[in-house]
Image (tube, helix red, strand yellow):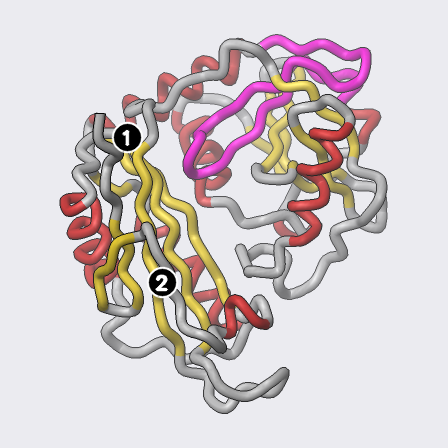
């Protein structure tokens, strides 16, 4: 069977993703001077693009990047749709939308204008689904995620997440949970965190320094819509030891339940309900 040909859009130019596709001097590559968003595709349609775009705009403001006026939701939606069609992705997929400051300069850039880069990839699952086996997690101790004005955004300075994921693999675990300098749990190496106790959802607050996840926002809204209480608050390791459930959320995977933290085991009743609500929400649109 022939391998599916995929395409990328490099600032308006569509090329195959099978060869070199960025220019020398790209500041996202040389300095991590950029932002990105990972988006989910269902039934060949990109989901939740408005919230992803809004986070890009806010992140660009913090990074002092200058978006052109034609960077709009419909602009990126059109380019993503074009790539999905060319790449023959008609069901499940994922999109990575990158924004980089234009090349030139060293640490001090010559200009603050930006370019965009879009990649699309198929995934087997069309709908969101819950993992059959719960993840095994622990705390990432080697490095803290220090709160800063960048904490809520997906910048290209992701080395702490890379090292946490490597640490999980080295320890035979599925993921690691990152903490801040106060010992509060913020998120995992690739997802936001929710803890369930007595039917109530708790999640770290944005002011603590966690990522402002688009799926985090959606799960909070869905939970409230279906009568579940949700509180943004500090999450400590001791809270994990008395929780009934722990699950993780990100835009591409949706909801992933955690089966164990050290010797503690968890259920997935609430996570399973929320996955059903999530699919129902998007299938109705």
**Residue 220 in view (yes/no):** yes
Badge 2: residue crowd in 10 Å (few <14, some 14–19, many ≥20):
some
Give the percent coordinates (x, y) of residue 251.
Answer: 43, 38
The first of marks 1 and 2 along the sequence is 2
Q: Secondary structure at mark 2?
A: loop
Give the percent coordinates (x, y) of residue 9.
Answer: 27, 60
Relative depth, front residue between 206 and 156: 156
The residue at which mark 2 appears reads as: 21
37 with respect to 157 (left or right): left
Q: Residue at x 29, y 28 (%)?
A: 281
Give the position of the C terminus as an image quadrant. Answer: top left
- Numbered-mark total: 2
123, above or below 53, in the image:
above
The residue at which mark 1 appears reads as: 92
Residue farthest toward the front in the current orientation of the protein: 1
Q: Secondary structure at mark 1?
A: loop
Give the percent coordinates (x, y) of residue 26.
Answer: 47, 73
| Quarter where residue 148 is shown | bottom right
Closer to us: mark 1 or mark 2? 2
Badge 1: residue crowd in 10 Å (few <14, some 14–19, many ≥20):
many
Q: Residue at x 27, y 77 (%)?
A: 69
Give the percent coordinates (x, y) of residue 110.
Answer: 50, 91
Q: CA distance from mark 1 to mark 2?
A: 24 Å
Which stretch is magenta? 240-267
């Amino acid at each position: 069977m022939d391998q599916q040909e995929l395409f990328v859009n490099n600032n308006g130019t569509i090329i195959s993703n099978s060869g070199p596709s960025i220019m020398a001097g790209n500041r996202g590559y040389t300095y991590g001077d950029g932002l990105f968003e990972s988006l989910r595709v269902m039934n060949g349609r990109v989901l939740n693009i408005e919230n992803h775009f809004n986070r890009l705009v806010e992140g660009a403001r913090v990074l002092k990047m200058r978006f052109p006026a034609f960077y709009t939701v419909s602009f990126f939606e059109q380019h993503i749709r074009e790539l999905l069609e060319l790449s023959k992705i008609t069901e499940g997929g994922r999109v990575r939308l990158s924004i980089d400051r234009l090349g030139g300069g060293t640490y001090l850039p010559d200009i603050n204008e930006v370019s965009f880069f879009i990649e699309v990839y198929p995934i087997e699952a069309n709908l969101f689904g819950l993992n059959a086996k719960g993840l095994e997690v622990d705390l990432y101790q080697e490095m803290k995620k220090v709160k800063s004005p960048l904490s809520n955004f997906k910048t290209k300075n992701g080395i702490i997440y890379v090292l946490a994921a490597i640490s999980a693999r080295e320890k035979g675990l599925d993921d690691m949970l990152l903490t801040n300098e106060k010992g509060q749990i913020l998120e995992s190496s690739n997802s936001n965190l929710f803890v369930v106790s007595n039917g109530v959802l708790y999640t770290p607050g944005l002011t603590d320094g966690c990522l402002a996840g688009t799926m985090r926002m959606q799960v909070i809204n869905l939970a409230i819509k279906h009568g579940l209480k949700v509180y943004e608050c500090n999450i400590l390791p001791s809270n994990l030891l008395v929780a009934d459930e722990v699950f993780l959320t990100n835009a591409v995977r949706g909801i992933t339940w955690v089966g164990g933290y050290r010797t503690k085991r968890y259920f997935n009743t609430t996570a399973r309900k929320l996955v059903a609500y999530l699919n129902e929400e998007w299938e109705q649109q």
